[in-house]
């Protein structure tokens, strides 16, 4: 008797699990293929958050189906119960994906002596209309490279520094942004040869060389800058002549 009741429950929950896994894969493609291309998921802390969110969502939905499913239950009641479970599960998944979207990386900004990944959630809403013409404050496809202009005077520098102490980084202030091309001379002045990084941290040699091979670039023609993100530190690899970004790696080069 128990086995007769158990088999339909297992089939129903297995089908639910398969559907949940497909939805999770589609969400992962969107999150890590569009909003958090590698390695920004790791640098921004989105990977762990997404895995926890999806893991809980995938586990609880099929488990709830296993509990409520029964061949002896009235059809309308069973359909209603399953619809409630699906609605709650989709709502939780949608809310989680929306939360990840709001925190997505939007810009990689040269911050005078380093690169900083700026996330949508880090830019105060009241600052969004201060972005210079031609620069989208919150692009869907990012992160886009930008630079910071010099301070107009000591008062502006003091104000920006105080705001940074209170949690609003210089790179999160759109009024300071400039096109990346304008910052290239300063970028090249601040950047250092990748060979120096390998000498300082030999354990980075393998990942660095693989990244340059993928980028079809030579070691001698590449420079780097340390990179700051919300959760972790990284390294931005740049062309030694144009300063154009080649790759970003989750290697702390500070």
Image: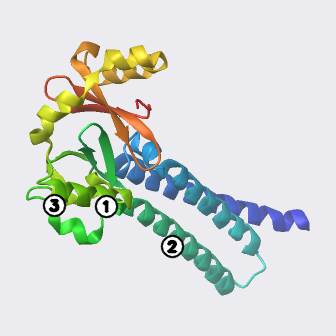
Label whose residue precedes the other's in the sequence (2 or 3): 2
| In this rendering, the label closer to the viewer, 3 or 1 | 1
Colour mode of the rendering: rainbow
What residue did someone put label 2 on?
A: 91
Numbered label attached to residue 131:
3
| Residue 134 position (above or below residue 128) | above
What residue did someone put label 1 on?
A: 163
Under tag 3, what secondary structure? loop
| Residue 102 position (above or below residue 148) | below
Looking at the image, which residue is at 39% across and 59% down? 103
Looking at the image, which residue is at 76% across and 71% down? 67
Residue 238 falls in which quadrant of the image? top left
Q: Is residue 59 visible?
A: yes
Looking at the image, which residue is at 42% across and 50% down? 230
| In this rendering, the label closer to the viewer, 1 or 2 | 1
Looking at the image, which residue is at 18% across and 28% down? 189
Under tag 1, what secondary structure? helix
Mark 3 to mark 1 CA distance (whole Å): 17 Å
Label whose residue precedes the other's in the sequence (1 or 2): 2
* In the displayed structure image, the side of residue 145 where residue 203 appears, left or right: right
Label whose residue precedes the other's in the sequence (3 or 1): 3
Under tag 2, what secondary structure? helix
How many marks can you see? 3
Mark 2 to mark 3 CA distance (whole Å): 34 Å
Picture quarter with the N terminus = bottom right
Residue 213 falls in which quadrant of the image? top left
* In the displayed structure image, the side of residue 17 where residue 156 appears, left or right: left
Q: Can residue 136 be seen in this view?
A: no
* In the displayed structure image, the side of residue 74 where residue 121 appears, left or right: left
* Position in image of residue 99 (x %, y %): 44, 65
* In the displayed structure image, the side of residue 96 where residue 185 appears, left or right: left
* Position in image of residue 113 (x %, y %): 27, 36
């Amino acid at each position: 008797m128990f086995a007769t009741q158990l088999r339909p429950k297992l089939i129903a929950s297995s089908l639910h699990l398969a559907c949940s896994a497909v939805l999770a894969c589609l969400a992962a493609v969107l999150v890590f293929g569009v909003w958090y291309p590698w390695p920004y998921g790791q640098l921004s802390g989105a990977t762990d958050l997404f895995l926890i969110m999806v893991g809980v969502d995938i586990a609880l939905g099929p488990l709830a189906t296993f509990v409520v499913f029964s061949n002896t239950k009235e059809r309308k009641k069973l359909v209603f119960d399953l619809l409630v479970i699906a609605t709650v599960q989709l709502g939780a998944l949608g809310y989680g994906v929306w939360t990840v979207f709001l925190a997505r990386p939007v810009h990689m900004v040269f911050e005078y002596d380093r690169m900083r990944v700026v996330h949508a959630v880090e830019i105060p809403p009241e600052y969004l209309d201060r972005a210079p013409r031609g620069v989208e404050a919150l692009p869907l496809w990012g992160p886009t490279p930008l630079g910071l202009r010099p301070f107009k005077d000591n008062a502006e520098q003091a104000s920006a520094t105080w705001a940074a102490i209170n949690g609003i980084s210089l790179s999160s202030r759109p009024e300071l942004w400039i096109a990346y091309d304008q910052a290239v001379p300063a970028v090249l002045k601040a950047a250092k040869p990748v060979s120096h990084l390998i000498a300082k941290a030999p354990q980075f040699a393998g990942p660095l060389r693989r990244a340059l091979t993928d980028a079809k670039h030579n070691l001698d023609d590449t420079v780097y800058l340390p990179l700051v993100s919300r959760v972790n530190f990284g390294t931005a690899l740049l062309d030694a002549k144009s300063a154009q970004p080649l790759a970003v790696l989750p290697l702390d080069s500070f």
